[in-house]
Amino acid sequence: MTDLFGAAAEARLTSRAPLAARLRPRSLDEVVGQGELLGSGRPLRVLIESDRLTSVVLWGPPGTGKTTIARLIAGATQKAFEPLSAVSAGVKDVREVAERARQRLGERGQGTILFLDEVHRFSKTQQDALLPHVEEGLIVLVGATTENPYFSLTAPLLSRSTLFRLQSVVPDELRVLVARALADTERGLGESQLRIDDDALDHLVDRAEGDARHTLTSLDVAAALASEAGAEAITLEHMETALAMRALRYGDDEHYDIISAFIKSIRGSDIDAALYWLARMLEAGEDARFIARRLVISASEDIGLADPHALPIAAAAAQAVEFVGLPEAMHNLSHAVIYLANAPKSNGAKSALMAALADVRDRPAGDVPMHLRDASYRSAGALGHGRGYVYPHDVPGGWAPQEYRPAEVADQVYWRPSGNGADQDRRPTGARTYEPTRERDQ
C-alpha cells in the first residue's frame, strides 16, 4: 500500500511540475544542445556511457543542461548517486556522504558519485573538506556551476576535476525544444492543442538568451494565459506578458566579462558600445562605485596625456557617485563614459611606467648621482652632496644639460609621446626629446 500511495503521489507531482521539469530529457539523445560534448563519440558522452567518469565540473549559463546531465549520469552509472546543493549543504553533509561511500565500497565494492549543485557556493573550508575524498577516489564529484570555476573553486579541487564548459542553447535548438513541448501529449502541452504564432515564437527565442529552462517556463506561462483567454494559439501579446518579469542575467562571469567589454569599448572609442555596457551594468545592479573606479583607471591607462581633462572628469564622476548616489549619478557616469570614449587615446603614461619598473626590477640599482643628493644638512657639502648641481631656474630657458639618472639606466627611454591629442613632447629646446611613436604595449 505504501508503494501504491508513493507511486500515486509521484505521478501527481509529475503532472503538476513545471513544463521544464516534465520535459527533462530521459536519455542523452533527448538533450537539446551541447552537441560538442554529448554528440556521438564526443568526450562527455563516451565517459558517461562507459561509466568511466572521473570528477568533473559542468560550467555554463543557466538553462544549458547541467542538472539534466547530472541526472542522466545517475541513470547511466553503476555507482550510487548522492545529490547535494551547495546552497544548503555543509561540511557535515559532505562527511556523511563520505561515510556512506566508504561503507558502500567496503560492503559491495560500489563507488559513489556526489552531485554538488551550485558548487561555487562552497567556501574554501568546505571545498578543502571535500578534497581528500575526491583525491583518494572515494567520491567522484560532479559539480555544476554558473560561475567561472577559476574564480570560485580552489586550485587543488579544480586540478583534480575535468572541466566541461556548456554553451548557451542556440535559437534553432530552442525552436526544436518549443516544438517538442507543443507536440508532446504525455509531458508537454500537446493535449491542449495550442499552437504558437510565428512572431510569438521569434520573440521567445530572441529573449530567452540561450536558456532552455527559461524558454520552457515562459512557454508554460504563455500557454496558461492563452488557455485562460480561450485562444487557440499563443500570441505575441501572451508571450510578451510571460517574458515581462525576466530577470537580467548577471553573475560573476558577466561581472568580469561585461566590465572588460565596457573598458575595451572606451579604449576603442566606441561611444554607443560603451553606453550599452554601462546600461547593462546599471540595470543589473552593479555597484556604481566599481564602475566609477574603472573609469578613473581608464582615464590614465588609455587616455592619459592625450587629453589631460579625462582624469579630472572621471574623478568628478566618481565623486558624484559618492555624493549624489544612484539613480541620479547614472547621468554623471554617462557624461564621463561619453567623454572618455570620445577622447584621443594614449597609453604612454602606462607604458612609460611599465618600462621604468622593468628596469628597476631587472637592472642593478645605481647610486643617486652626487650632484642630485640631498645637500640640506650639515656636513653634506663635505661629502660632496649637491656639488655641481645647476638650478634650472637660474639658466635662460629654464634648462641645463645635466644627468638626472644613475649611469646604469642613463640611456634608457621610457616615455615616447604618441602624438595623439595633447600627448606631445613639450620639454625645453635642447632637452632630451623624442619623436611621437605609434608603438603600443602588448
Image: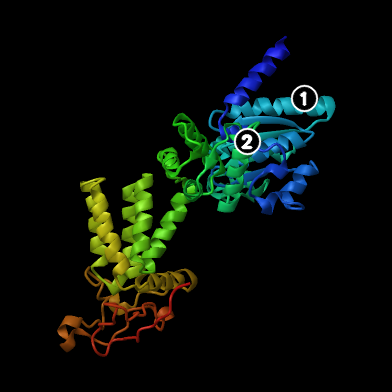
Q: Earlier in the sequence, mark 2 or mark 1?
A: 2
Q: In front: 370, or 442?
A: 442
Asked if residue 426 lies left or right of residue 362, the reply is left
Q: Amino acid at mark 1?
A: Gln
Give the SS element for disc 2: loop
The spot of residue 297 in percent (x, y) is 34, 61
Whether residue 55 is visible, yes or no, is no
Residue 22 lies, with reference to residue 381, above or below; the image says above
The spot of residue 344 in percent (x, y) is 31, 73
**Residue under the point 23% across and 48% down:** 328
Residue 290 lies, with reference to residue 340, above or below; the image says above
Q: In front: 180, or 274?
A: 180
Q: Residue furthest bottom?
A: 430
What is the crowding at mark 2: few (fewer than 14 residues within 10 Å), some, or many (at least 20)?
some
Give the SS element for disc 1: helix
**Residue under the point 23% across and 62% down:** 312
Asked if residue 1 lies left or right of residue 215, the reply is right
Asked if residue 416 lies left or right of residue 330, the reply is right
Q: How is the image coloured?
A: rainbow
Whether residue 334 is visible, yes or no, is yes
What is the crowding at mark 1: few (fewer than 14 residues within 10 Å), some, or many (at least 20)?
some
Give the alpha-carbon distance from disc 2 to disc 1, as whole Å.
Answer: 35 Å
Q: Amino acid at mark 2?
A: Leu
Q: Which residue is mark 1?
A: 103
- The circle on residue 23 is 2
